[in-house]
Amino acid sequence: MSQTTRPGPRERLLEAAREVTYAHGVNVGVDAILQRADVARRSLYQHFGGKDGLIAAMLHETRNDHRYRETMDAAGDDPRERLLAVFDELDRVVSRPEFRGCRFTAAELSLPDDRHPAHAEIRQYKERLHELFAAELVALGHPDPGFAADQLLVLVDGVLAHAVTRADAHPARAAKATAALLLGDRPPA
């Protein structure tokens, strides 16, 4: 008979924050997170100093820039194909019934206090994506990789936002065609 170990309060708080804030936004009441985590309020303060610290830590641990790299690596060595593969993966992600948008953008827009620690996590995440795209654009020989990486991020953010209201329109496919033009070639079929 196998015995499973229940995660500790810190891990349960992070998982509850991931689930509850994705479903209801980062401004959800702390009681909903505590109830989902099945921990006492004291654990929240011991591990994170409060809800703001929990939200920042959850975003830090939820960063999925490695998934972008994995997607690109699976596409082979050609930088153009690697970048376009991102949009194929986004099409799969945003087509899932449970997709509710980009948690990072939603948090950024929902937290009016510029001093909230989540803002730094969100900006670091977006900067890491920018660097990832810029490196591919350098390998591609793009004349302005920094600006083109900005353009790709706008397309990615647009897909993640547009899919919330019109997933059936397949915004990632439209963005992929635009990205192909940006990369200096004809749009993919």
Image (cartoon, helix red, strand yellow):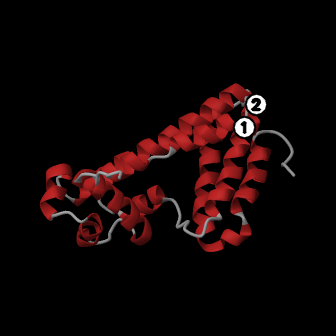
The residue under the point 38% across, 46% down is 61
Which numbered tag is attached to residue 65? Answer: none
Residue 66 locus on image (x, y percent): 53, 40
Residue 89 pos. (x, y %): 67, 51
Residue placed most toward the observer, 147 or 131? 131
Give the residue at x 62% y 58%: 93
**Nearer to me, 97 or 156:** 97
Residue at which label 2 appears: 78
Q: Residue furthest front?
A: 1
In this orientation, does residue 106 appear?
A: yes
Q: Is residue 35 left or right of residue 81?
A: left
Give the residue drawn at x 59%, y 60%: 160
Can residue 114 be seen? no
Amino acid identity at mark 1: Ala
Q: Which marked residue is nearer to the observer: mark 1 or mark 2?
A: 1
Q: Is residue 141 above or below residue 24?
A: above
Q: Residue at x 87, y 45 (%)?
A: 186
Asked whether disc 1 touches disc 2, contact meaning CB atoms under 8 Å apart, the reply is yes
- Counting from the top left corner in percent of width and height, residue 8 is at 24, 52
The amino acid marked with disc number 2 is: Asp
Quadrant of residue 131 in the image? top right
Q: Which residue in the protein does label 1 denote?
A: 75
Horizontal arrangement in the rendering, residue 43 relative to residue 22 (left or right):
left
**In what element is the residue under mark 2?**
loop
Label 1 – label 2 distance at C-alpha: 8 Å
